[in-house]
Image: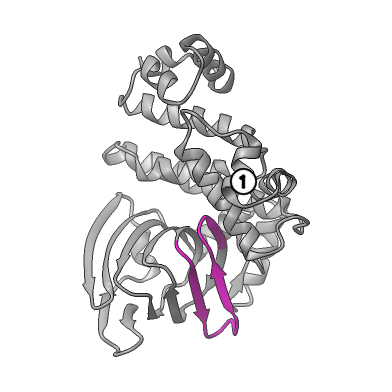
Amino acid sequence: MPFEVRDARDKHLIHRNAHVAQDFDVPELVEQTGELEFAAGRGTLTHWYFDGIRLGHARWHLRECCTQEWYSQLDVVHLQFNLRGRLVLEHRQLGRPLVMGSYQHNLMYSPGFEGTQRHEELEAETFMVQFTRPVFLRLCEQANDVLRRFAERMLEGKPLVLGEQSLTLNLALHHAIREVLQCRLQGPLKKLFLHAKALEILALQADAFERHQPRRFVRSEYDQERLLFARDYLIQHLHLPPTLPELARIAGLNEFKLKKGFKELFGQTVFGYLADYRLLEAQAQLIGGQKTASELAFELGYSSLQHFSTAFKKKFGVSPRELRG
């Protein structure tokens, strides 16, 4: 069987399908969603595939932390984005675990997979992009050095992981994934949109690894956890964000560690991240027709509609009114 997942404790079958990599090389967009129920909890899985590309999204609601045994014959390059929860992947051919916390990502290749996946938190969410081997190798012909070197090592046929340490999602990656999950287009237009997003996500991930420097300020899991908490708190209080000293106190960090660590982890200053997040949030809601510019200016904490409109036009080249049509 090309793919199956079992509960590691009792070998109970959780999920099975007969997909092989060639199945994803179809001209029309295929979209599938399914619900899974098993002893430790339940999950919702959605995937889209076409032209040798597959995108997938999963949410897990667990009653207890669990380990799953995975077996796959898929010969694909796999871009893994761990959006929520701590995940430990044990790939038997790699010989070492790949640990991914919330908002972390990595890229891997294997001509098949046999190992375990452990969810260490009760709420988990993942996103992935997969490319069949021929499609990925063709894309890498005009990619950066990071992907070209990865492609060269792929030709040896051995399992690979791009980064020894998984990286934290920057805002651009986070937004691109969100756009996939919120896409309302249908048919050929949705396929065109998802194709563009798959390539964008690959490019953003490759760029993130190319720019990555050894960390100087975020040296422990505790520091990273506190900075992720600070980011989440900031997003939850867009309307009235805390000052830097307040955010440092709330997150349990000193102000120096907050400023330096945040920039190192997310690639932006605290308030640079906040400003971009507000505008990207506004863009998504305007495109979706969910809110007016006046409502968004108030909800996102702008001092006036004019201030919001000026910042929006500077960022996107059009006013909120023009975007909403």
Q: Residue at x 37, y 24 (%)?
A: 286
Q: Is residue 142 visible?
A: no
Foreground residue, 39 or 45?
39
Question: As displayed, is residue 143 above or below residue 95?
Answer: above
Secondary-structure class at tag 1: helix
Q: Which residues are magenta?
A: 85-106
Confirm whether the magenta stretch covers residue 105.
yes
What residue is pinned by disc 1?
249
The foreground one among 315 and 271 is: 271
Quadrant in which the C terminus is drawn: top left
Residue at position x 56%, y 52% in the image: 228
Residue 237 position, x and y percent, is 47, 35
Q: Position of residue 214 (x, y in %)?
A: 76, 59
Q: Position of residue 275 (x, y in %)?
A: 57, 29
Horizontal side, residue 7 vs residue 310: left or right: left
Asked if residue 167 is among those painted magenta in the image, a careful observer would answer no
Q: Quadrant of residue 292?
A: top left
What residue appears at the point 32 percent right and 78 percent down from the top-left corner?
Answer: 4
On the rendered structure, is 143 left or right of 6?
Answer: right
Question: The N terminus is located in which quarter?
Answer: bottom left
